[in-house]
Amino acid sequence: MSEAPDYTEAASLKLSEVLADIGVNTRMILKRRRATLLFESMTNMSCYILGLNMIRQYIMGSQAEGTTTPGLNSDTDLIICSNIFHVIQDWSDWQPGVINLLMIQDHSVSPGYCQLQLLSPEEPLPFPEWGIMLSTLSDLIRTDRIGRICFRNSFLTRSALSLSGLVRHGPAYSSVEKDVVFAFTSSTWPLQARQWLHQQSVGQWPTDEIKQYCCSSGCFLVGVGGQHGSENEDLEWRISTCSAEKCLMYNLNITQIRCYVLMKMIIKTFINPLFNDVISSYMCKTVLFHCIEGTQSIIWQENNLIVCLSLCIHDLYTTILNENCPHFFIPENNLMRGKITPEVKPFILDILQRIINSNGVALLGIKCDDLGTRLQLKFNNILICPFRTYDDVLKKLLESLSCFFLSDRVIMYMILNMEPVQVSNMLKQAISDLVSLQCHGLDKTARNLLASKVCSMLGSVLASIDIQQYNTISAETLKWISLGLNADVASSKLKLASMLYCTGQFRRAEIVLCDIEKHYDLKIVEPICPHYITAHLTYNAGCDLQIEEAMKCTVANCVQFWPCEVYCSPKELRQEMFRSTEEDKAFRTLHDFWMNSAEVDSLTFLYFLQYKIYSHLNKQEDKRVALSKLTRTIEQEPRLAHEETALNLLGQCMEQEHRPINALQCYSLSLNIRRRNNAAKIHICRLLSTLINNR
């Protein structure tokens, strides 16, 4: 970058272009937000139709705000709330017949925290002494120094310790791609934050309307250890205002959002790798809020991005220098307390000072999303960028698409051990509840998407019952199936083709498969599995579509058969439902409950069904071509989520071709991919037994 005084505006515009290229643009941000809100709504509707009204899920953080990039690789932050208790801040809000919890926010509690006092359900009074019961529940409740019975902050999170696959990380339980926080919710704005509603700012931000909305969002009470060293550390619950923070993020302009993303990139590149993540994204967000509040709104323009970023980094420098990062709503809560040791503080300040003095040149050293190199190319007027743009940006957006196929996981978990007739009755009631649900806007879209999925599921269960009893599919069943046929490019139609195959309707199945293959453009369609996120994505036409439209024409979900749908599945695939021995099950986590189903990639299943159908129709050349496509897909397709299952199906095709050695090779390769919870063990034992007996 030039050192000329007038370079700042040009540099800001070039930097804005680069950030737009990697997805920090209005269009992509809105797509991320919409996808997140739809998934959140669909998940909560799934709980509603199952009668799980006391649980609600909220998606927060960078994914929900749209303030992430492929290189930042932000987690999805989930807050799972229990509404079993009624949390109040004033005695006048006490309600009879429910368990009320009073938020204690007096001088004995650290700023930004509260205690939760248990109240009597019969009258607005403290809960009476429990005597011997109190000692029995001492791991969940205890009395504070003035005799109030309060919940320990481990009350909610104790149950999460049993969720294998989740690892404790501060207040959250982390898995590969998400942080899960368990919390209570309060519908009222925290007392400690009410002063913020009336204070005036230099930039007249947030507006009074935004403040009122923030106030109506209430707060969460997170079960995390209280302020270290406080008198009642085990009784203090952290007050989280993340709903209000999400509202503020939604009301930032694109330059302010880009400043936040750049701050995260700077911290990720220059500071946290050296000093063990001492500065969090949340601190950066808080510094940004204070900076916007303290400046005139006119400066936050695209051609002034470098200056705006310098202001934010300078405020971060001051925050670290003073070791004080006031919470935006509760300034008495210092987010930086105890975070930075005296030994590392001078080094961090020196790094930040050099970044400030560089007038933007330091950005060339950012490798995240190849930002520095992209920026250099922009300044050298090199128009052909060697880096993927749409591909990288769409990776995270397509990952969010996979969430839609997980939105009914609550339903799947519920039906896991139910009989087919029970499942069909439950799904019919669920559809009735969805139809009667009054909603508008995005919630209405979510309801329609979920209803389509539930109808498809119901049709498949009814088809399995029909096939078992009558070896045919009734007109009513076909009606339900048709309502969910267009959920994506292939999976629902493949299930229909599988049902037709299982009832011997080979020519009708062939027609369905030909239609699927015609619309499955390998250059456009993306295979998506809600259980595995594949890293190899190509340019996708779905970038110009709404999320729900992109699912219909550019996404191919995996095909999944649950035990209640077993007769809709070819016998070769049914073995996947029995992939786990008792020993294998010990190595499964709660998230692996899908392993009780038979799940296969759409493209794999397409060619496998073609092979089987052409075998029955005695179309030898078409059968050979289908087998060749199946083999080539397994060998060359990098996006298969269930490669071990594909190899198991190919092995059985090889057995049908009287090629047992090739079959054994397929099963061995499958075991190399997944040593445990793999049906290949069944196939190997069966094949070896057949070979020995025949010999």
Image: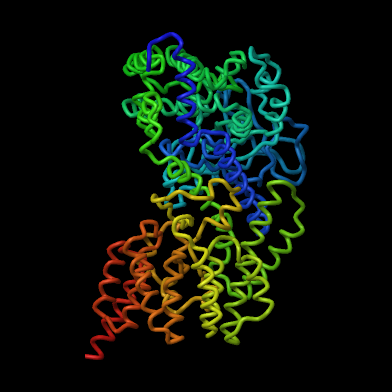
Look at the image and tell me in which quarter the N terminus lies.
Answer: top left
Residue drawn at the location 72% of the way across and 27% of the way down = 212
Where is residue 339 drawn, in percent x and y? Answer: 41, 23
Of residues 35 and 408, the one nearer the viewer is 35
Please determine whether, in this image, residue 463 is positioned above or below residue 119. below
Percent across and percent down for residue 579 are 39, 70
The number of numbered discs placed on residues in the rendered structure image is: 0
599 in relation to 152, above or below: below
Furthest residue toward bottom: 694
Residue 474 in view here: yes
The spot of residue 448 in percent (x, y) is 68, 56
Please indicate whether residue 138 sits to the left or right of residue 197 in the image.
left
x and y, in percent, of residue 319 in the image: 47, 15
Q: Left of 55 or right of it: where is 416?
A: left
Location of residue 361 (image quadrant): top left
> Camera-side residue: 35 or 12?
12
